[in-house]
């Protein structure tokens, strides 16, 4: 009998209920009790919708981030929040965001560092450790949730971040060896597992996605040490790996003294045979056969052809699951009322994916006849997608084929271009700019919603957005910024906005996926060959430029970010889809230039997150990703200044490729990591201009002028001052004007001060 389970369920709610509940709490519009009961209601609902599974995850829910929750459960709470008012929830919000509900400045603290969860667009709060870190178990919340789950009639399988992955994700502020903490950490995990055992928990899921990384001997040894130390606890442990292949870690993973192993049978299907051979016969093998990272229906008949012989061989020891937590896909396809029905028939969101697991298990346990109808419907959908004329466009394929190396080259080297650009733009030293968006106010969102619903005419919508653009321009002029932006009021999201206008994309109404905390994104779905039927941004930028004599930046999302933040086709290579996007956005760049826009920013916020987890595959990715950016950007005249922007990224290991993009100016995130990023410039002379973000836009805290000066002075030690820009570290859309204005005032003041000092 194949057993079914799930690794994690989206916690944000099908209608983003959690987001709205916590934002109301943060604004002081609702009480902690209201937030807590909303969370409990969501958990109940999630368990009910997973009740057909044999084991259901518990502990996957979080009010902000499950890695942060793990830090609290392990008693690894930053000292700066200890002793502040409020409870654990408030303190976890302070670590995550810099403040909780109702905090005055006294209780505001530095927000924890946030970074991407493996190669996904989910961000976790980096655990802070040092040589002095001590752990102490605080498992009350998890234990209570087990009771909650049982009350819903499901069999709970608690989910933990495994000890080795926890340390892998942690950052030692003092530069000490994280692994040295393992010895102190393991007794706390043991205590936790014992407590779960006492609660009668049968299986615990221990996530160790580090297993899909290149691991050196120390980390490999740490995994063995950890699970040796945890063997003998009462609950059975299911160690899970996901997001890639195990490769040289197969033997290590199969040899751990635990009761079961989960592998990503989407990304690593070709390894399953070797894993079956290496895994002792009494161990459970959980196959993640349904893609937890994408939205396409699985080919169930094809999977059954593969799984049936495995089921015969493994019997009770075969478990079926999604490849990873379903955190990375939207909740329910059935909420989509407006989606093109043909394309919708090709898709599966979290609930539908669990349905697929159920059908597969039933087919294996009772024979295909027992699920003849769902199998037939599935086969029909798979065949319809393969045959659809809407997927392939020979003209687009031909254009990609005709790309020449020259299309990715600027006419002159940077130094020559820079001279022309500087003569043309006449900017001061330490020029100031912002990253693109200004606050997305309630009025903006209301107008967009009304327009979408048909209650606001296109003309009226345009008028309102133009008023917002005017406001942004006037504010920027008053602040004295040098290169202005239009503020992006017309954009719901930097990827969706373009996806909606390109052919080959569909978008959902409720396809939200959590990015961090209450922030969600609604990735468009790239289903077919990409074409740009008309200019997407030109009218807005032209309007903004008509209001001011200062240069206004054209603002685009780059092809790599479009790709990495979309759900993309699984029937052609990512690089092929990316080249199609590059050609489409290149057309937009050239149209902007023709419209007289002198500065064009092409955001590649997500370039780094597309890096494969394995080093050996990096160069191949970087080569085509950078080439796609170059195709997009480099068709312009020397006088046109190309900017790019990247956020939440570490560049130390890819700086050569970043430089090879050959953008005239790059703006980057650095403020949260105290300009640590700049260390790379000790080793590598970045050849073009750069704006290291000096203001952490993810926190409501206002950066003091002196902090900006200190950060820029640090930057100037590594990069010639004449190539430095002063800017926030990302767009300002999540902030409000009351925060943005004083912050930018300080930033502009600081730039003036730097100029005076340099003069
Ligand atoms: N131009 C975008 C903005 O300012 C960039 C956002 C991002 O990098 N994530 O909102
Ligand atoms: Zn950014």
Image (cartoon, grey):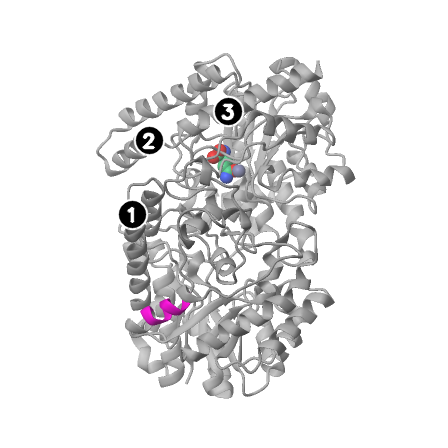
Is residue 664 visible from the viewing direction of this image? Answer: no
- Earlier in the chain: of badge 1 and badge 3, it is 1
The CA distance from mark 1 to mark 3 is 32 Å
List the residue tagged with mark 3.
Answer: 744
Is residue 144 visible from the viewing direction of this image? Answer: yes
Residue in the foreground of this view, choosing between 149 and 605:
149
Percent x, y of residue 555 = 50, 30
For numbered disc 1, what is the local secondary structure? loop
Residue 63: quarter of image: bottom left
Queried on whether the Cβ of the residue with tag 1 lies below 8 angstroms from ligand 1, the answer reads: no
- Magenta highlight range: 142-148
Q: Residue 599's mark?
A: none
Residue in the foreground of this view, choosing between 469 and 46:
46
List the residue tagged with mark 1.
Answer: 31
Percent x, y of residue 676 = 67, 41
List the residue tagged with mark 2.
Answer: 444
The CA distance from mark 2 to mark 1 is 27 Å
For numbered disc 3, what is the local secondary structure? helix
Determine crowd level at label 3: few under 14, some 14-19, many 20+ residues with C-alpha closer than 10 A: many
Residue at coordinates 67% horizontally, 57% vertically from top-left? Answer: 131
Queried on whether the Cβ of the residue with tag 2 lies below 8 angstroms from ligand 1, the answer reads: no
Residue in the foreground of this view, choosing between 510 and 284:
284
């Amino acid at each position: 009998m194949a057993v079914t389970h799930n690794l994690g369920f989206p916690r944000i709610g099908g209608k983003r209920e959690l987001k709205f509940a916590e934002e109301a709490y943060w604004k002081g519009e609702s009480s902690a009790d209201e937030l807590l009961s909303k969370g409990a209601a969501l958990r109940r609902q999630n368990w009910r919708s997973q009740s057909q599974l044999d084991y259901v995850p518990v502990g996957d829910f979080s009010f902000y981030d499950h890695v942060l929750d793990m830090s609290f459960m392990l008693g690894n709470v930053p000292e700066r929040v200890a002793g502040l008012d409020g409870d654990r929830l408030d303190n976890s919000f302070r670590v995550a965001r810099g403040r909780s509900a109702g905090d005055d400045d006294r209780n505001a603290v530095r927000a924890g560092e946030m970074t991407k969860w493996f190669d996904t667009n989910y961000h976790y709060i980096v655990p802070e450790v040092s040589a002095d870190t001590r752990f102490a178990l605080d498992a009350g919340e998890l234990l209570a949730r087990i009771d909650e789950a049982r009350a819903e009639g499901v069999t709970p399988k608690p989910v933990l971040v495994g000890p080795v992955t926890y340390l892998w994700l942690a950052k030692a502020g003092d530069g000490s060896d994280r692994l040295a903490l393992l010895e102190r950490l393991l007794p706390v995990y043991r205590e936790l597992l014992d407590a779960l055992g006492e609660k009668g928990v049968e299986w615990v899921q221990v996530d160790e996605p580090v297993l899909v990384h290149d691991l050196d001997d120390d980390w490999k040894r740490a995994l063995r040490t950890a699970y040796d130390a945890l063997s003998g606890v009462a609950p059975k442990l299911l160690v899970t790996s996901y997001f890639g292949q195990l490769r040289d870690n197969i033997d290590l993973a199969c040899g751990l003294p635990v009761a079961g192993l989960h592998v990503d049978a989407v990304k690593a299907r070709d390894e399953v045979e070797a894993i079956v051979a290496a895994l002792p016969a009494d161990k459970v093998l959980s196959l993640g056969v349904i893609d937890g990272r994408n939205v396409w229906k699985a080919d169930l008949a094809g999977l059954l052809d593969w799984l049936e012989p495995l089921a015969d061989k493994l019997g009770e020891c075969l478990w079926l699951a999604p490849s990873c937590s379903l955190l990375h896909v939207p909740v329910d396809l059935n909420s989509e009322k407006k989606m093109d029905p043909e394309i919708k028939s090709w898709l599966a969101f979290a609930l539908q994916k669990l349905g697929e697991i159920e059908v597969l298990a039933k087919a294996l346990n009772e024979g295909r006849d027992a699920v003849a109808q769902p199998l037939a419907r599935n086969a029909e959908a798979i065949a319809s997608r393969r045959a659809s004329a809407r997927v392939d466009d020979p003209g687009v394929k031909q254009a990609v084929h005709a790309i020449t190396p020259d299309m990715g080259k600027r006419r002159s080297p940077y130094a020559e271009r820079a001279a022309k650009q500087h003569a043309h733009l006449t900017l001061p030293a330490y020029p100031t700019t912002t990253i693109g968006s200004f606050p997305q106010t309630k009025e903006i969102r209301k107008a967009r919603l009304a327009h979408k619903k048909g209650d606001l005419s296109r003309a009226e919508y345009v008028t309102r957005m133009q008023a917002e653009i005017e406001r942004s321009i006037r504010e920027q002029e008053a602040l004295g910024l040098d290169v202005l932006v239009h503020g992006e009021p017309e954009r719901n999201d930097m990827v969706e906005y373009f996806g909606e206008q390109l052919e080959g994309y569909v978008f959902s109404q409720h396809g939200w996926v959590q990015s961090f905390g209450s922030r969600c994104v609604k990735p468009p779905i790239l289903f077919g060959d990409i074409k740009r039927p008309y200019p997407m941004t030109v009218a807005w930028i032209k309007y903004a430029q008509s209001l001011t004599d200062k240069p206004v930046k054209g603002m685009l999302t780059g092809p790599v970010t479009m790709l990495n933040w979309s759900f993309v086709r699984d029937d052609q290579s990512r690089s092929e889809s990316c080249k199609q996007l590059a050609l489409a956005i290149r057309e937009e760049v050239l149209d902007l230039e023709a419209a007289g826009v002198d500065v064009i920013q092409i955001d590649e916020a997500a370039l780094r997150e597309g890096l494969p987890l394995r080093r050996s595959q990096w160069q191949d990715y970087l080569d085509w990703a950078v080439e796609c950016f170059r195709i997009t950007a480099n068709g312009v005249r020397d006088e046109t200044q190309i900017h790019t922007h990247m956020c939440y990224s570490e560049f130390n290991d890819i700086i050569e490729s970043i430089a090879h993009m050959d953008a005239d100016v790059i703006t980057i995130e650095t403020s949260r990591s105290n300009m640590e990023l700049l260390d790379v410039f000790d080793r590598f002379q970045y050849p073009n201009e750069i704006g290291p973000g000096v203001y952490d836009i993810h926190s409501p805290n206002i950066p003091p002028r002196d902090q900006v000066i200190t950060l820029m002075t640090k930057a100037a030690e590594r990069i010639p001052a004449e190539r430095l820009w002063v800017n926030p570290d990302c767009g300002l859309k999540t902030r409000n004007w009351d925060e943005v204005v004083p912050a930018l005032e300080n930033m502009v003041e600081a730039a003036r001060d730097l100029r005076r000092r340099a003069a």
